[in-house]
Amino acid sequence: MPLELKVLADPAAVAAAVAERFLQRMAAAQGRGAHPHVALTGGTIAEAAHREIAHRAVDHDLDWTAIDFWWGDERFVAPDSDERNALDARSAFLDPVGATRVHEVPSTADAPDVRAAATAYEELLRGSGAGEFDLVMLGMGPDGHVASLFPGFPQLDVDDRIAVPVTGSPKPPPERVSLTFPALNRTRAVWFMVTGEEKSEAVRRALAESGDLHDTPARGVSAIPHDGTRETTWFLDLAAASKL
């Protein structure tokens, strides 16, 4: 699988590069008459990229009401909790640009438990009729986890579900909903955004020629090759790339 590696000076440069390519990609998709479906992520670098997208959006002629936004994972907490990935994405990016097709994972106000939340989100995604994402954006933890797929967890081996509940997360909050590998990989493009020296060892493992996704879940995500337009790109700062 061809893989593109972009190493940039610092987190600000990563956010800028991601933002510019995001806007170009959405414009190209709409230019060919496509209706893009995008899976967003959370985290510090994602927040920076979201703000940069909103800042640069004024220079791009996009119909934000014709892009569907989803999440690769979400924390099962109250809808107004600052731990919700959606809360940050809405305030930093989606609301400022006027996005209207925003599909949040059910919160504790919308579902009785995390299993019900995962089932409801899976049904929502299946019902969208999209078939695949145009773009999946992901961060990666120092342990190599992506979305809420953690090393050694049983969700890594689920191949018959779109979304799964996660309990006992090694980082708080303990309950989450995550898309599975099969769902994340049904995309025309996967972009990893990773910054910081503390993630450099996980980056090395993720990009090594051999390794086990049960130890480094990021190894399990790549765009499915199909028509030559699919891509897997890693946006790294110098610190994150320091062990390559």
Image (cartoon, rainbow, N blue to C red):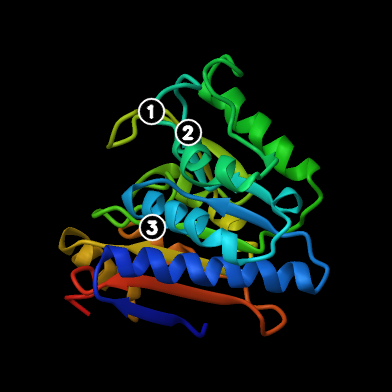
In the image, is residue 217 above or below residue 179?
A: below
Q: Which amino acid does label 3 sit on?
A: Pro
Give percent across and percent down for residue 160: 64, 48
Q: Which amino acid does label 2 sit on?
A: Leu
Give percent across and percent down for residue 236: 31, 71
Mark 3, residue position: 217
In the image, is residue 93 above or below residue 108?
A: below
Give percent across and percent down for residue 102: 65, 40
Disc nearer the start of the sequence (3/2):
2
**Front one among 237 and 162:** 237
Is residue 8 visible to us here? yes
Give percent across and percent down for residue 24: 60, 72
Q: Which amino acid does label 1 sit on?
A: Asp
Q: How crowded is mark 3: few (under 14 residues within 10 Å), some or many (20 or more)?
A: many
**Discs 1, 2 touching: Cβ within 8 Å:** yes
How far apart are the two marked residues, 3 and 1, measured between alpha carbons? Answer: 26 Å
Q: Is residue 108 left or right of residue 26?
A: left
- Which residue is depicted at the point 19% across and 66% down? 201
In the image, is residue 51 above or below residue 221?
A: above
In the image, is residue 54 above or below residue 210?
A: above
Q: In what element is the residue under mark 2?
A: helix
* The label number, if any, that marks residue 87 in the structure image: 2
Disc nearer the start of the sequence (1/2):
1
How far apart are the two marked residues, 3 and 2, measured between alpha carbons? Answer: 26 Å
**Which of the 4 image quarters holds residue 213?**
bottom left
Disc nearer the start of the sequence (3/1):
1
- Which residue is depicted at the point 44% across and 82% down? 4
**Front one among 216 and 42:** 42
* The label number, if any, that marks residue 118 in the structure image: none
* The label number, if any, that marks residue 82 in the structure image: 1
Please state which of the two labelled residues, at mark 3 or mark 1, is closer to the viewer.
Answer: 1
Q: In what element is the residue under mark 1?
A: loop
